[in-house]
Amino acid sequence: MLSQRFTSRLTKRAVPPRRCSRPRIEGLEDRLVLYSTLGAQWVYASRITYSFVPDGANIGGYSSSLYATLNAKYPTATWQLQFQKAAAVWQAVAGINLCQVGDDGSTLGAYGNQQGDSRFGDIRISAVPQSSGTLAICLTPPPVNGGSEAGDLIFNSTSNWGINTNYDLETVAIHEFGHALGLDHSAITTACMYAYFNGFKQSLTTDDINGIQSIWGSGKTDIFNSNGQSNGVYTSAPNISGYLNSTTAQAAIPNLSITKTGQSEWFAVTVPANTTGTFVTTVQSTNLSIFSPKLQVLSTSMALLGSATSSDYGATVSVSLSGVRAGTTYYVRVSGNTAGNPFGGYGLLVNFGSQAQSPIAPPNTTVAWAASQGGGSESEGHDLVSIGNFTSYGDALEVSTAGVRMRAVTHPAAVPSAIAGQTAVSTSAIDPGFWTAHAVAKVGRTDRASTPSLPIVHSAGRRVSHAFDAAIAAWKGRGLIDWADA
Ligand SMILES: [Zn+2]
């Protein structure tokens, strides 16, 4: 059908030329901007870690049973991959690196660092029995929660978990990671950040991407891909020989990244005079991100001399050449392995000497414990949730849309400026409960008699203002609201 339409448009004689008497609607402008944010995020974007809590860890008086629950259905690597994939969809589009680390089984909320605690991940994933309507809980990231519990995910060990079947682990993990990275719920029913589980969602919607990028920016550029630099082809490869240590004949370049589909980073390196005749090139994302690297080493005539790749989420791959001679130049090409996670941060190491080379150390992301700041009453992510005898700020993902969530609303100080740049969105894509909760007159005003079924917007809450602005814009675009009412 699509090709038929294209064919018609391209065949002038078959279809009379269309009269263009009406203004053309700007293409691709129907942005879905109904996401909202928690107003909470990690101090350091360079490395946000997550970990799988070992069974037996104390979660509010319960013993975590994540492994027992999911090992009963799938091999450990299989279910953990669902979480890795979930982390990867966010890392791919945002200016963050996520990194899987170990977990010593400390009690949930143990006194420790808000971020960068060496005992466990910033985002700890556990499971305990919860009520049947709840799939998982996310404890709101800092500074709403100020301790080590910030960002932690507690899955319901009694839910019927599945992979590509209900309840799909990856779908729920994407939603919970979204909260742990600072997103609140979206009013778009197809968004991963919609408040209820209503089907598989294994990739982000535009609304999810707009939301995460509003918090973390759109991606990680490195020094070879910013300020007019690009090393995307071999002819623009920078020669990194200047990084070589004159004694060890080694170089380590941190903070590199692959951010775009099909992107390669090319480097040239010339063998130094003090080489011992070996050339080891290493791409490291282990301990830095969940990037799956692909490495190729080539001659200046583009002969492939060696390659290495991994589909692991966080890996280190190396290529070794022997018999190299001083003055010879080689090309190094780094890209992502699409069989794993092809986007993320990494470091590049080269070694022409005889000593073993140390891996690149992760950035220091230590943020000490702080008192929980809580938040306003208008975000679900700032609700108090209890897991056993542990209470914290957080949000629970619920199974059905049976209940309509009502949010408090307050008067805006002014018309949100965001309206000016927004276009109307399809109201059919928006949770009906959203309108009930956000857009119906409820502060002593009377709906206009001429449009009794249409809402008059009176108020917007600051916490949910972005979502609310979009809703307002949708109605405003149709002439259905009047800001003078507010
Ligand atoms: Zn949620």
Image: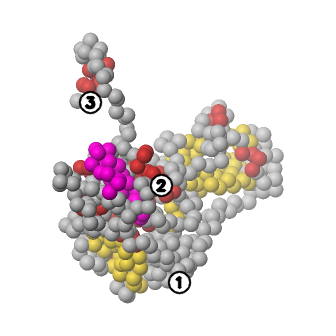
Residue 284 visible somewhere in the drawing: yes
Report the quarter where the C terminus lies: bottom left
Task: Tell me the kind of residue under disc 2.
Answer: Ser
Tag of residue 2:
3
The residue carrying mark 1 is 111
Dot placed on the residue nearer the N-terminal end, 3 or 1: 3
Name which residue lies at 78% across and 56% down: 248
Residue 121: % across, % down: 50, 71
Whether 296 is drawn above or below 447: the answer is above
Residue 117: % across, % down: 56, 75
Name which residue lies at 26% across and 12% down: 13
Residue 440: % across, % down: 25, 60
Left or right of residue 149, residue 169 in this image: left
| Residue range corresponding to the magenta coloring | 461-485
Q: Which is more toward the observer, 44 or 312?
A: 44
Task: Tell me the kind of residue under disc 3.
Answer: Leu
Report the quarter where the N terminus lies: top left
Q: Which is more toward the observer, 193 or 63?
A: 193
The residue carrying mark 2 is 214
Name which residue lies at 55% across and 61% down: 45
Dot placed on the residue nearer the N-terminal end, 3 or 2: 3
The Cα–Cα distance between marks 3 and 2, rounded to whole angstroms, is 34 Å
Left or right of residue 61, residue 119 in this image: right
Name the dominant secondary structure of the magenta segment.
Answer: helix
Dot placed on the residue nearer the N-terminal end, 2 or 1: 1
User: Which element carries disc 1, helix, strand or loop?
Assistant: loop
